[in-house]
Amino acid sequence: MFQATGNPRNATLLDRGVYVSIFCQSIYYGSITIGTPGQTFNVLLDTGSSLTWVLSSHILSEDTDRKYRRYNNASSSTYGNKRQVFDIEYPLNKIAGLWGTETITVAGLKVKKQHFGEAMINSGLFNDADVDGILGLGFRDEDDDPTIFENMLKQGVVSAPIFSFYLNGGYRTNSHARDSVVTLGGTNPEYYTGDFTFVDLTAPDQWKFNMDKVQLSNGAATFCRPGCEAVVDSGSSIISGPVRDVNILNEKLGAVILPESKKLYVLDCSQLDNLPDVEFILNGRKFSLTSRDYVLKLDGFKKPVCVSGFIGRRRTALFEADWILGNNFMRAYYTQFDQGNMRIGFAKAKHE
């Protein structure tokens, strides 16, 4: 068990909003500084990855027209070159570059000699978002260097092996009344109501747990019986599940597939209040999402477009689970990631 001192610290996240690519995505990012003096970057706080990286000023290849903020190691007195190459494959993109060590500051918490990557090859990741890299909050492989949260604990800048997400936004009234926040080193009762329901992790290297089932509140369909595996992922904007199950789920909601996407389903925006809840049963307790939680409303067209927040997927090496609960689930439920007890806690998010 890590021993540390200090109080929980809040890091404000900004909701970049919803944009359309091959998937419908809503990106939540936060600001960090790297180096001495500090260079500022926007990063996706990602529980699905253990790696932290930002784009380098020493770019070798890039498939984008966007002007990113770039890390310059020559401008920092605390940079350490590990002389090791990295190569990360994402579903649609690739990042490659060099590993190094640096001083990284998150929400005023300074972590020294943190292992991180400066990406010199970018095949177009985050083209449509104001994001310069990723801060990994997932579990590392046994042979990898400590993650940034592990080093926060080792260096005594947070008090407990817990971090928590409060996400605002989505298709709800007063959606931007308060900022989205990640609390490092604990939880913040200001952002949730009631008690936590906990699920134990079923793997040492992922935020993965057993889910009892998924069902529609009107009884039209039930999935994930007699139980299945799920992960919570702050880097996923929507909920994904087995292709067959999600196709049936969307059809029961009255959604129609977009032919050009072959993945996205659209709904009649005028009928949202008539849609059933989608219920996730976790450790015997019901966690309901209303249509205002699971529908993504896209503006900027002749008329609003409402997209289902459920998409089909197949199990991959990255996520060896049946269902991924992304941002549209986490907006409804404040989520506590407890590394010390190897569990995840959910409580009703307080949006007013």
Image (spheres, rainbow, N blue to C red):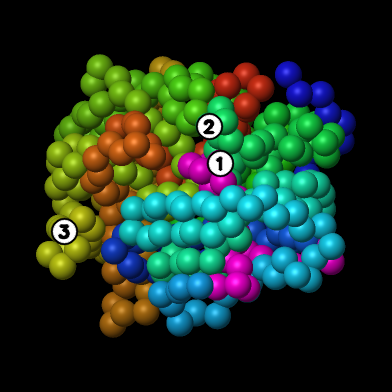
Please say if 69 is above or below 302. above
Residue 154, given in percent of the width and then of the height, sits at 79, 32
Q: Nearer the viewer, residue 330 or 91?
A: 91
Image-quadrant location for residue 36:
bottom right
| Residue 13 horizontal/vertical position (percent) | 63, 57
The quadrant of the picture occupied by the N terminus is top right
**Residue in the picture at 60% in, 60% down:** 118
Q: Residue 141 carries which label?
A: 2
Residue positioned 34% across, 68% down in the render: 20
Among numbered discs 2 and 3, the one appearing first in the sequence: 2
User: Where in the figure is residue 274, as x and y percent of width and height?
Assistant: 26, 50
Mark carried by residue 50: 1
Q: What residue type is labelled 1?
A: Ser
Tell me, yes or no, whether the highlighted magenta stretch contains residue 166.
Answer: no
Residue 43 in magenta stretch: yes
Residue span colored magenta: 36-59
In contact (CB < 8 Å): disc 1 and disc 2: yes
Q: Could you say whether the residue bearing mark 1 is in a helix, strand or loop?
A: loop
Q: Residue furthest right?
A: 5
- Label ID, residue 262: 3
Q: In this view, does 249 lie to the left or right of 341?
A: left
* 1 vs 2, front mark: 2
**Residue type highlighted by circle 2:** Asp
